[in-house]
Every structure is written in structure tokens, then in C-alpha cells.
Amino acid sequence: MITEETPHTAGATGLSRHIQRLLTRTRAFDARHPWVWDATLTLSWAGAALVDGAGGWQNTARDPSVPGGLVLVLSLALSLPLYWRRRRPMTALAVMACAALVSDASGAFLQAAYLQAIPVFHLALTRQPRALLWAFALILPPLVTGAVRFPQETWDQRVIPALWAYALVALLGFVVRSRRDHTAGLVDRARRLEVERDQEVRLAAAAERTRIAREMHDIIGHNLSVITGLADGGRYAAAKNPERATQALDAIGTTSRQALDDLRRLLGVLRDDEQEAVRDPQPTLADLDTLLTGVRKAGLAVELEVRDEPAPQPLAPGAQLTVYRVIQEALTNTLKHAGHSARATVLLAYAPKELLVEVVDTGTPTTARPHQGQGQGLTGMRERAALYDGLLTCGALSAGGWHVRLRLPLEGSPS
């Protein structure tokens, strides 16, 4: 969590940390009550200017006979505008420059004129660099006027050192501004990194929830469809062939236990204690026979046809799981919607660059099926295919029935 003190106190120890913490609190107070610091600074410099105007100004004056009233007014004009140095630095500098012009032209040469450096600093700190050109245009006339009217000092003694001093103040303003911007950039970057991290965590959690929902749909939906088919077949066989009914009940028990085991393994990975989770290999193409056997027990006649030989380099385990789940979902939909007299064919056709998977059933043309784009099953199949750059299509056949077709690029041959 980024706090107000973190950017300034990170890495500091001992006395340095306490000083930085104090500075941070001072800045925070100044941000909430800027007038307090502005008034304090202005009154401090106004007091110093008035003390100098009480008689000390004559030690540096070129004309000690300047009226005291004028010196008092000039001292206030060179100090009171500091109250607006942060909000309107150019205006404050303009007022002070006019007072400095009168001071140097009269020969008073008040030292309060050097307070013009404070607005110059704030111009460098908060304004565009071109504002300093106008600032030096305001500062230069008083210096030139004093050098011309009272040439006791040469130009390089009166004008050049003062200009260098103001230039160094402006440079200091640029340095402070650069450091402040750098610190603000680091704080902003840290906050954005925190936001991005939180977003990544939420996206990862959403993706994991989607994956778990897809697995649970495939596991539970398929097994429940098989159990439903077995229960319907057992009910019809009970009156004529009790032995077949008993076999159906045994198959229901086996399928139910398998579904519970699969669900228990899936939920086990969600526990906090990872050691308690049971980890079994995910289904592959080698498990298709077991899948088809369970579907046949549920009453659906299904055949498997494999064309051409599998590629020397087998599909990645994730791709095999995708093929398995697509076939499983397609047969589950056939069990749900195609009717008891339907038949299904599963085709695996290997090509040099892709694997074609096709599941076709012989349901009647009037059989209600989910529309494309609807239902968790179709969405899950498309998501699985997209993970491996595959293309999945499905729809009704003109002669009746339904087909699901998956084209999956082989490893190293993306579509």
C-alpha cells in the first residue's frame, strides 16, 4: 500500500528518516493550509525589510538622503507581494521589480530588492521555461538604471553578479522541479503497478473460475446424462428382463462413483492445503474407448472411426484433453436431445497439418437442440478449441440429426 510518507522515507534510517517524515508532514500541512506558510514567510521578510529600512539601508545606499517614507513604502512593496509568489509569481515579481526600479533610480539600493529571487524560483518551479525570459526582462531594468545613474561600480561588479545569482536561483528551481516530478512519477508508477497487479489477480481468478466451471459442466453434465440414459433403459427392462435392469443399476452406481471421484479431485485443487489435493492425469485420446463404453451403456449406439495414422509426434496433453472434452460434450448433447433411437459416429481424421474431429448423430429433424452461441456446453467447446487455435462448428443436418466439427492444428502447424 502506497502511503503519503512512503515515497520520501523508503530506504532512510535513523535521523534521516525522522527529518524526511517531518518534511512530509510539513508539506501535507502546507497543502491543506497554504495561506499559513505564505503569510508566515511574507511577514518574516517584511519584518526584515522594515528593520533594514529603519536605518541599515544607508550603509549600502548611493544616496543616503532618500526620504524615510519612500524607503518604508519601497520596503513593503518589495516584501508584501511574496504572499502571492505561488499563485501569481509573475504578478508578484512585476510589483517588486517596479519597487526595485524606484529604489535603484533614487539611490536607496535597498537590499530587499534581492527578494525578487523568490518569485523567480517559483516561476522556474511551476511555469514554463519561457516565463523566465519575462522574469529577467523585469529584473534587468532596475540593475541597468542603478549602474547608469550611479557609476561608482563597474557593470561587471553591479549587473553581472546579480544576473548570475538570479540564474542560479532559477537553476535551483529547475532541479527541485525535476526531483519533484521524478518522485511523483515513481509514486504514480507504483500505484499503477498495484492496480495492474490487482487486475491481473482478478483476471486470473476469473479465468480459473471459468476453467473450473467448464470442467464441472463437462464432468457432471456427461455423467448425469449417462445416468439418465441408464435409468430410463433400466426402467423399460425391469418388466421384461430383470437381469438387464440389474446391469443398468450396476452401471448407474459405477458412473455415479466415477462422477463423484472426478468432482472430488476437481474440488480438491481448490483447498488451501495443496498436499491434500488428489492429482490424477487428465483424460487423453487413449481414454476414448472408456468414454464410448459408458455412452453405449447409457443406450446410445456410437461408433469410432479413425482415418489415417496418427502423427509421429502426438498431440500435446492439453490438446488431447480438448478433443476428449469436445467429443464428450457432443455425445452428452446427443444423449439429451437425439432420442432413444439415435445413433452417433465419432470420426478422427489425421491430416499432415491438422486433426479433424467430427461427431454426427441421427436425431430427428424436429429434435430440439441448443442454438449456436447458447448454452454452457457449446461455449465451453469453443473456448477449448480457441486455446489451441482450433475452429469448432456445429449445427443441424438437413437429413436430420446434428453434427459437431473440430479442426485442430497439429503441434508446430498453427492455422
Image: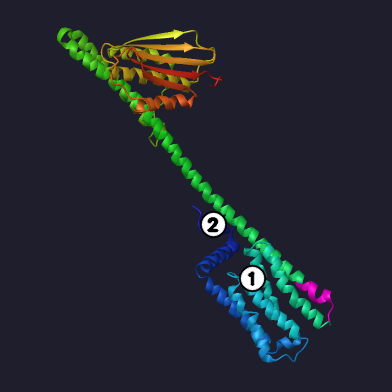
Q: Is residue 152 left or right of residue 142?
A: right
Residue denoted by label 1: 90
Mark 2 = which residue? 6
Q: Looking at numbered disc 2 in the image, what kind of residue is underneath it?
A: Thr
Is 195 left, or right, of 369 in this rendering?
right
Separation of disc 2 and disc 1 at Cα?
34 Å
Q: Position of residue 170 (x, y in %)?
A: 70, 66
Q: Which residues are magenta?
A: 152-162
Residue 269 visible (yes or no): no
Image quarter of residue 77: bottom right
Residue furthest front as drawn? 398
Residue at left offset 32%, top offset 20%: 333
Q: Is residue 153 magenta?
A: yes
Name the front one of labels 2 and 1: 1
In the picture, residue 336 is in which quadrant?
top left
Q: Residue at x 71, y 83 (%)?
A: 102
